[in-house]
Image: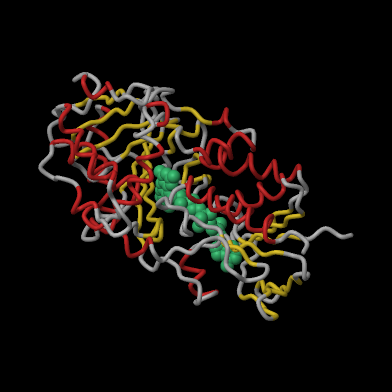
C-alpha cells in the first residue's frame, strides 16, 4: 500500500513544527515555502551593511515554554540556546538612570518579592498582589480594566511585560492571553522563567536544526513555492496551485495550511482569522561592547523595550510600533541610540552603523475581539488542517504558540486522517 502524503504549506515555526511531528510519526511529508528560506518571522540572515548575520527581530523565550523545549530537544538544538541560566532580568530606567536586576527564586513560592535586592526597584511586597485580578480574567476582560496603573509595579513590570509578550497597547489587551502566559511562567516560579536566548542566531537554533532533522526523515522542503489557490472536490482539496505548478492531492492525502493570517483571509475567506495586526521595529547597532553574560536588558521609560548585546551587535526591540507612528523609522535610530549609549556607557552623539527593520504584520493584535476570531486546527474539511500562531492556541503570537499550533495540526492529521 502506498503511504499517504502530507503537504505542509509554509515553513515558519508552525509549518516546521507540523512537519517535524508528522515526520517523527513516520508520515511522508513535503513542505512548500514561498520564500527562498525557512523560518518566516523567526529567522536570521546576513546583513551586508553590518557585515554580519542578524535576526529579523529579538525573540525572548522562557524555560516554561514547553513546546519550545520539546522542539529544541527533538531537533537536537538544546545546546544552541544560552542566556543567564537563572531567572534574572536586568533593567534600566531611562528616565532616572536607575538600574536593578530582578532575581526570582526557582520554586513556586515567590519569596523573592520579600527581598528588596531581588524585587523590582521601588516596589513593596504588597504591590505584587496586583497580579490577583488576573486570576479571574475571562475572554472579554481587557488589562486596562484589571490592572491598577497607580501601582508602582505597573510602569516597571506590568507595562513592559504586557507590551513585550502581547505586542499590543496594554489598555486594550486581552487579560486572558496574559493570564495564560503568566500561568505557564511566573505562576510556576523562577524555574519556568529562565530566559533562553540563541547563542548564535534564531536560524541556528530554530530553523537549521529542524531542517536537518527533517532531511534525516526524507522530508523535502520546496522553496520558491507560493501557494495561489486550492482546487476542491466536495469537502476535499484535490490540487494545490503554486503559480501554475499544480500538485495533485491523493484521496488519502492531507494538506496542512501553516500560512500567515493575512494570507489565509485571501485564500479561504470563510475561515475566521484575526484582522488586526501590530508591528515591531528592530534596530541593530554595531557596538564595541562586550557581551555581559546576561544577554539582554529591559529598558523602562524609553522607546526601546529590550536590548540584546551579542557578538558586537546591540539589537533593540520596539514593540507595538504603531504607538510611535509619528516618528519616521530612520529618526528612530538616533532616539534609540541615545538609550543604548546610556545603557552601555557609549557616546550618544556618535550613532554607529545600524540597520532598522519594521515588521509590519509582526503579530495579531492580542485583544479580546481578535482572540475570538482564531479557529481550531481541525477545520471539518476532509483533508485540511490549520496551523499558525494565529490559530486557537490560547497564547498570543509567540514561538511557543506557533509550535503548539503545529503539534495540534499534526494531531488532527494523525487522528482524523487514519484510514477509515
Ligand atoms: C520582530 C518580531 C519579534 C518577535 N518576538 C518574539 C519573541 O520575543 N518571542 C516569541 O515567542 N515570539 C516572538 N515573535 C512572534 C513569532 O516570531 C511568531 O509568532 C512566529 O514566528 C510565527 O510563526 P508562524 O509559522 O505561525 O508564521 P510565519 O513565521 O509567518 O510563517 C508562515 C510561513 O508561510 C510562508 N508563506 C506565506 N505565504 C505563503 C504562500 N502563499 N505559499 C507558501 N508559503 C507562504 C511565509 O514565507 C512563512 O515562512 C516575534 C515576531 C516578530 C516579527
Q: In this view, does 392 lie above or below 292?
A: below
Q: Is residue 57 visible?
A: no
Tell whether 155 sits left or right of 362. left
- The part of the image, by quadrant, that contains residue 58 is top left
The residue under the point 53% across, 41% down is 67
Residue 99 percent coordinates (x, y): 21, 26
Instruction: Decide which of 232, 111 is in the foreground and name it.
Output: 111
As rendered, which of 320 and 357 lies closer to the eye? Answer: 320
Identified at 29% across, 43% down, the residue is: 135
Residue at 76% across / 45% down in the picture? Answer: 217
Scheme by which the image is coloured: secondary structure
| Residue 185 visible, this orientation | yes
Quick check: 400 left or right of 243? left
Please say if 195 is above or below 238: above
Residue 330, image quadrant: bottom left
Which residue appears farthest toward the right when viewing the image? 1
Residue drawn 48% across the image and 72% down it = 265
Quadrant in which the C terminus is drawn: bottom right
Residue 110 falls left or right of residue 197: left
Which is nearer the eye, 358 or 89?
A: 89
Q: Residue 174's spot in the image, x, y percent?
A: 30, 55
Q: Where in the figure is residue 6, as x and y percent of width and height?
A: 72, 60
- Residue extending furthest left? 150
Count of labels shown?
0
> Residue 285, image x and y in percent?
36, 39
In the image, 393: left or right of 34? left
Indicate the quadrant containing the N terminus: top left, top right, bottom left or bottom right: bottom right
Amino acid at each position: 500500500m502506498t503511504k499517504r502524503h502530507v503537504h505542509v504549506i509554509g515553513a515558519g515555526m508552525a509549518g516546521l513544527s507540523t512537519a517535524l511531528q508528522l515526520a517523527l510519526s513516520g508520515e511522508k511529508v513535503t513542505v512548500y515555502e514561498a520564500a527562498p528560506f525557512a523560518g518566516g518571522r523567526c529567522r536570521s540572515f546576513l546583513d551586508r551593511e553590518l557585515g554580519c548575520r542578524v535576526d529579523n527581530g529579538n525573540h525572548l523565550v522562557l524555560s516554561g515554554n514547553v513546546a519550545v523545549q520539546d522542539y529544541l530537544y527533538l531537533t537536537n538544538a538544546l545546546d544552541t540556546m544560552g542566556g543567564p541560566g537563572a531567572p534574572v532580568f536586568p533593567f534600566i530606567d531611562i528616565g532616572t538612570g536607575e538600574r536593578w536586576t530582578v532575581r526570582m527564586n526557582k520554586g513556586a513560592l515567590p519569596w523573592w518579592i520579600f527581598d528588596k535586592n531581588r524585587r523590582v526597584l521601588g516596589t513593596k511586597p504588597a504591590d505584587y498582589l496586583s497580579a490577583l485580578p488576573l486570576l479571574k480574567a475571562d475572554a472579554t476582560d481587557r488589562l486596562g480594566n484589571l490592572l491598577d496603573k497607580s501601582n508602582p509595579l505597573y510602569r516597571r513590570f506590568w507595562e513592559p511585560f504586557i507590551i513585550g509578550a502581547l505586542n499590543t497597547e496594554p489598555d486594550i489587551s486581552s487579560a486572558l492571553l496574559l493570564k495564560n502566559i503568566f500561568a505557564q511562567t511566573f505562576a510556576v516560579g523562577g524555574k519556568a522563567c529562565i530566559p533562553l536566548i540563541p547563542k548564535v542566531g534564531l536560524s541556528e537554533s530554530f530553523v537549521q536544526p529542524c531542517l536537518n532533522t527533517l532531511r534525516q526523515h526524507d522530508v523535502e522542503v520546496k522553496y520558491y513555492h507560493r501557494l495561489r489557490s486550492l482546487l476542491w472536490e466536495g469537502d476535499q482539496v484535490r490540487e494545490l496551485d503554486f503559480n501554475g505548478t499544480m500538485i495533485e492531492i491523493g484521496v488519502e492525502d492531507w494538506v496542512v495550511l501553516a500560512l500567515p493570517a493575512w494570507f489565509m483571509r485571501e485564500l479561504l475567506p470563510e475561515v475566521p482569522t484575526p484582522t488586526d495586526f501590530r508591528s515591531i521595529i528592530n534596530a541593530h547597532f554595531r557596538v564595541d561592547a562586550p557581551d555581559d553574560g546576561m544577554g539582554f536588558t529591559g529598558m523602562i521609560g524609553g522607546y526601546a523595550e529590550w536590548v540584546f548585546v551579542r557578538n558586537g551587535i546591540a539589537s533593540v526591540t520596539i514593540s507595538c510600533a504603531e504607538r510611535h507612528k509619528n516618528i519616521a523609522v530612520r529618526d528612530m535610530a538616533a532616539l534609540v541610540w541615545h538609550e543604548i549609549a546610556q545603557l552601555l556607557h557609549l557616546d550618544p552623539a556618535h550613532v554607529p552603523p545600524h540597520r532598522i527593520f519594521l515588521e509590519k504584520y509582526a503579530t495579531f493584535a492580542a485583544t479580546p475581539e481578535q482572540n475570538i476570531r482564531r479557529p481550531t486546527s481541525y477545520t471539518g474539511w476532509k483533508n485540511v488542517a490549520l496551523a499558525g500562531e494565529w490559530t486557537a492556541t490560547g497564547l498570543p503570537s509567540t514561538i511557543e504558540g506557533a509550535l503548539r499550533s503545529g503539534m495540534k495540526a499534526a494531531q488532527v492529521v494523525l487522528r482524523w486522517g487514519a484510514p477509515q
